[in-house]
């Protein structure tokens, strides 16, 4: 076994190098996100090896989708496309070339003529967040609740030695976070590149990973939650609870990447409020799941104590959830009528309705179910899972909102010039 491990590592390192020995873009002119003062006369793409020309190798699109590129030609490892005169404005460059290994390599980037270049996620042809992306982000939120919310429940509410079931539930959350994070990045990249899946596998993702808030946040969060998972595993192996505290605090910190990567974030204060909103929801939902799945079936003698402690934590979480949500709604909705006139407002109304249902459900647990806890324990377990389902629906609405653009604020009226006498 000891000899097999180094061999496996070598194979893992060699195989990707062989599989991905296709042409890679080294330099583009104009460069990505460059704001040029004068319109360029050509687009030049330099690769690390020679490439072959294919139809529609380079297109340069303005905001209306008009192509300004003339037929391209190849000079060794350079792909060059002459341009018609470019008016002032932002432009999207989409390119494709045939690598020597037979694979089509492709990519997209943006630049501006006398104006700032848009991020590649707003490139011409990109549709923006899709329904599939919303669902994936919702699953990501659920994984975050299982992982970070579950650890928070263990430390703040349970306080006993962690059980095997606790580690199973939080471990599932860690896997979901890491896997769906990668899927979310690939979906956003596929939308930006607008390529068939076969060509997308060999696409240049660097403009997205290094040139957008979404991509940079994705890299930080994937590395961060891999570290959180490592501390969770160490806590399981060594039975040292302080490692769970490290994992919990790191998890809350890296969750801020969701607020940074969302399209709707505008100011630093909004990002902080969005992070508080998400953190409170994560603790609330994750705590409900831990209470219903971990504590209730395995520790009947601890149910009442756990329920009371969680009620106090849930009260704080809901208060933060409402306060942060109210602030964000005021900041992102220019007028009250945007609640029923805009798509963003419609989703927000659905979310508010679900939060109201969850609050009434929680109040029923606190004031009706608590006095009858001993007699109706089994029914309360099912009711807790029902409240968890409603809370998960709240996270679905949050997943849609975090990637949605709020209604645009009206431009200030131009000052009226004084009449000459």
Image (spheres, rainbow, N blue to C red):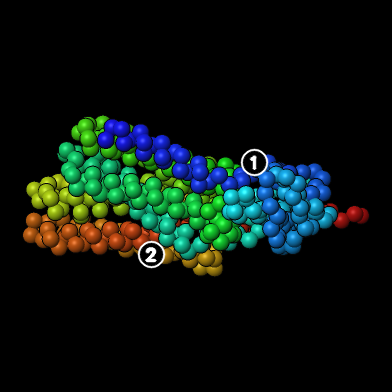
Horizontally, residue 398 falls left or right of residue 309, namely: right
Asked whether residue 378 appears in the rendered view, the answer is yes
- The residue sitting at the bottom extreme is 341
Q: Residue at x 43, y 43 (%)?
A: 222
Q: Give the SS element for disc 1.
A: loop
Assess disc 2: are there few (<14), some (14-19) or many (≥20) residues with their C-alpha within 10 Å of its C-alpha: few
Numbered-mark total: 2
Marks 1, 2: nearer the viewer: 1
At 56% from the left edge and 61% from the top edge, which residue is drawn? 196
Identified at 57% across, 42% down, the residue is 210
Q: Is residue 364 visible?
A: no
Where is the C terminus found, in terms of image quarters? bottom right
Residue 184 left/right relative to 107: left
- In the displayed structure, does residue 389 sit left or right of residue 195? left
For the residue labelled by badge 2, is the local secondary structure a helix, a strand or a loop?
helix
| Viewport quadrant of the N terminus | top left
Residue 48 numbered tag = 1
Residue 406, given in percent of the width and then of the height, sits at: 55, 58
Return the disc, 1 or 2, that comes first in the chain's sequence: 1
The residue at the far right in this view is: 421
Q: Which residue is mark 2?
A: 353
Measured as percent of width and height from the top left, residue 374 is found at 8, 56
Q: Which residue is drawn at the image coordinates 15% and 53% (left, top)? A: 296
Q: Is residue 316 above or below residue 243?
A: below
Q: Quick one: 171 or 18, which is closer to the camera? A: 18
Spatial CA distance of label 1 from label 2 is: 55 Å
Q: Position of residue 20 (x, y in %)?
A: 53, 46
Give 344 or 210, whichever is nearer the viewer: 210
């Amino acid at each position: 076994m000891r000899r097999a491990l180094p061999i496996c590592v070598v194979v893992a390192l060699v195989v990707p190098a062989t599989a991905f020995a296709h042409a890679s873009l080294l330099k583009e002119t104009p460069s990505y996100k460059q704001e040029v003062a004068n319109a360029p006369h050509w687009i030049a793409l330099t690769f690390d090896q020679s490439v072959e020309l294919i139809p529609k190798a380079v297109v340069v699109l303005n905001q209306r989708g008009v192509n300004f590129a003339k037929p391209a030609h190849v000079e060794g490892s350079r792909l060059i496309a002459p341009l018609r005169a470019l008016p002032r404005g932002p432009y999207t460059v989409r390119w494709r070339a045939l690598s020597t290994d037979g694979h089509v390599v492709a990519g997209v980037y943006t630049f501006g003529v006398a104006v700032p270049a848009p991020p590649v996620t707003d490139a011409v042809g990109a549709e923006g967040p899709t329904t599939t992306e919303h669902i994936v982000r919702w699953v990501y939120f659920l994984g975050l609740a299982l992982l970070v919310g579950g650890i928070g429940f263990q430390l703040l509410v349970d306080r006993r030695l962690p059980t095997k079931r606790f580690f199973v539930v939080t471990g599932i959350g860690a896997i979901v976070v890491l896997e769906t994070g990668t899927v979310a990045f690939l979906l956003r990249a596929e939308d930006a590149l607008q390529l068939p899946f076969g060509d997308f596998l060999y696409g240049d993702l660097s403009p997205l990973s290094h040139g957008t808030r979404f991509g940079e946040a994705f890299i930080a969060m994937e590395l961060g939650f891999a570290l959180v998972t490592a501390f969770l595993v160490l806590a399981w192996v060594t039975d040292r609870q302080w490692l769970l505290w490290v994992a919990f605090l790191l998890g809350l910190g890296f969750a801020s990447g969701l607020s940074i990567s969302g399209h709707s974030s505008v100011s630093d204060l909004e990002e902080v409020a969005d992070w508080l909103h998400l953190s409170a929801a994560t603790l609330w939902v994750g705590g409900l799941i831990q209470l219903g799945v971990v504590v209730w079936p395995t520790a009947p003698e601890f149910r009442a104590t756990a329920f009371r402690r969680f009620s106090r934590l849930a009260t704080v979480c809901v208060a933060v959830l409402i306060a942060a949500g109210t602030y964000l709604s005021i900041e992102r909705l220019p007028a009250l009528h945007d609640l029923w006139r805009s798509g963003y407002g419609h989703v927000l109304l659905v979310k508010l309705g679900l939060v109201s249902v969850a609050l009434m459900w929680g109040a029923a647990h606190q004031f009706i179910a608590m006095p009858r806890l001993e007699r109706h324990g089994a029914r309360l377990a099912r009711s807790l899972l029902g409240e968890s389902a409603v809370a998960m629906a709240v996270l679905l609405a949050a997943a849609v909102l975090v990637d949605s653009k709020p209604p645009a604020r009206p431009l200030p009226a131009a000052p009226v010039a004084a009449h000459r006498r």
